Image (cartoon, grey):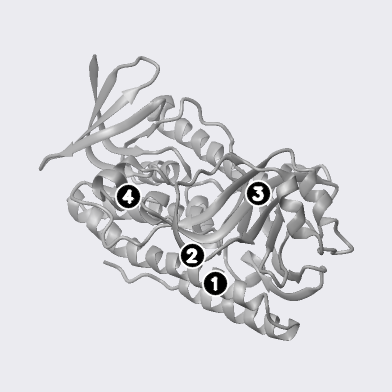
Amino acid sequence: MTSATTADIVIAGAGIGGLSAALALHARGIKSTVLEAAGEIRPLGVGINIQPAAIACLIGLGLGEALAATGIPTREHRYLDHLGATLWTESRGIAAGHPFPQYSIHRGELQLLLLDAVRTRLGAGAVRTGTRLHTYEQSRDGVRVHAHDRDSGSSVTFHAAALIGADGLHSAVRSRLHPGKAGLNGAGVQMWRGLTELDGFLDGRTMILANDENATRLVAYPISARHAERGKALLNWVLLVSMGSPGPAAEAAWDLPGVIDDILPYLADWDFGWFDVREALARSGQILRYPMVDREPLEHWGQGRVTLLGDAAHLMYPIGANGASQAIIDAAALADALDASADVVDALERYENVRRPATNAIVQANRKMDSAERVAAAGAEAERTTALATITADYRATVDRRPTPA
């Protein structure tokens, strides 16, 4: 059996980008329906950072209080060697002069925060869980989106003005738009991630970025305002280990289990003195592992009334902490474009012309930053300090570059 539904915009994927898009469109009076393949949206994952430009978008959507009640406004990045000595520091967010903070936050909690806002503002049925998109076809007047409803076992067709593929790493929309371009590029880096509850961590608003001469890197930062209220710190950590050269990568997943015994040998010579790195990582309730991957930037994202957003459009290395932030900025730009033009095809083209060059530049900048950090790790202390300052300044120049309006 097949049922039919009408929607202004169909968004495939109820991740951070897709939900942000639904909220941004709603704020401009544009209705949307979000299709999510998972039967239930649960607070999965670990910590992420949301940069000030993206926080500005979310605060503009009325989510400022919810963000402040959930995340940590990061004040400083502190770069260390593997013995805990400070090499260099960089102010972040408001402390760096931005009008908005940088938030460190649990990915799953941010997703649920956005989900609650979508359901409250757009209605309980705005997000269709257990509904997997499998194909679509365009006409001059709209898009017919065909999906499978897992609960009923039936097919459902949505008639919409546009389809937005915000369906992430394994995007079905991208696969149809760009067949044969799903290949992943690996950095030659294996990543392990976890969360550990501590009695405290520095001033509660500092992120550390440490490395040794082998380019083994540890990034760690608190992510929970609720833990901070109890005098605790929920520490998000990620260990990056160089295991080869950049090149084609096999299929990746974000939720493969990791084992602490695989991690500890890389930290055998690490000793901060003021913080027991190995003990903190070993206390993590769950460890996830995955390779650091991205995809080659696309020459175009969409076609006609169909386009991409977030990881589906521009999967990038997590170096620079910009993946989720760029998806949120995509969402705001998409809503602006659709609000400004009655011609949907023209609006999507304008959206892409603004966002594609900016995000493609960040994909390349993340690669450059990863490579430069690994090279710098082998230098003397003074050389490393100078290199870190240059690397981050170059990266900020790329990320903060304002796009040229279409």
Q: Earlier in the sequence, mark 2 or mark 3?
A: 3
Q: Are marks 3 and 4 in contact (CB under 8 Å)?
A: no
Nearest to the eye among marks 3 and 4: give it: 3
What amino acid does circle 1 point to?
Ser
Query: Percent x, y for residue 2?
Result: 23, 18
What amino acid does circle 3 point to?
Arg
Q: CA distance from mark 1 to mark 3?
A: 20 Å
Q: Are marks 4 and 1 in contact (CB under 8 Å)?
A: no
What amino acid does circle 2 point to?
Pro
Foreground residue, 307 or 121? 307
Q: Earlier in the sequence, mark 4 or mark 1?
A: 4
| Outermost residue to the left | 140
Q: Quadrant of the C terminus?
A: bottom left
Q: Are marks 2 and 1 in contact (CB under 8 Å)?
A: yes
Nearest to the eye among marks 2 and 4: give it: 2
Q: Earlier in the sequence, mark 3 or mark 4?
A: 3
Which residue carries the number 4 mark? 308
Q: Give the total number of marks visible in the rendering.
A: 4
What amino acid does circle 4 point to?
Leu
Which residue carries the number 3 mark? 193
Whether 393 is drawn above or below 76: the answer is below
Query: Percent x, y for residue 90?
Result: 67, 73
Q: Secondary structure at mark 3?
A: strand
Whether 350 is drawn above or below 331: the answer is below
Which image quadrant for residue 30? top left
Lateral position of residue 206 relative to residue 177, left or right: right
What is the number of the mark on residue 371?
1
- Residue 281 seen anywhere in this rendered image of the structure: yes
What is the number of the mark on residue 246?
2
Q: Secondary structure at mark 2?
A: loop
Q: CA distance from mark 4 to mark 1?
A: 28 Å
Crowd class of label 3 (few under 14; some 14 to 19; many from 20; radius 10 Å): many
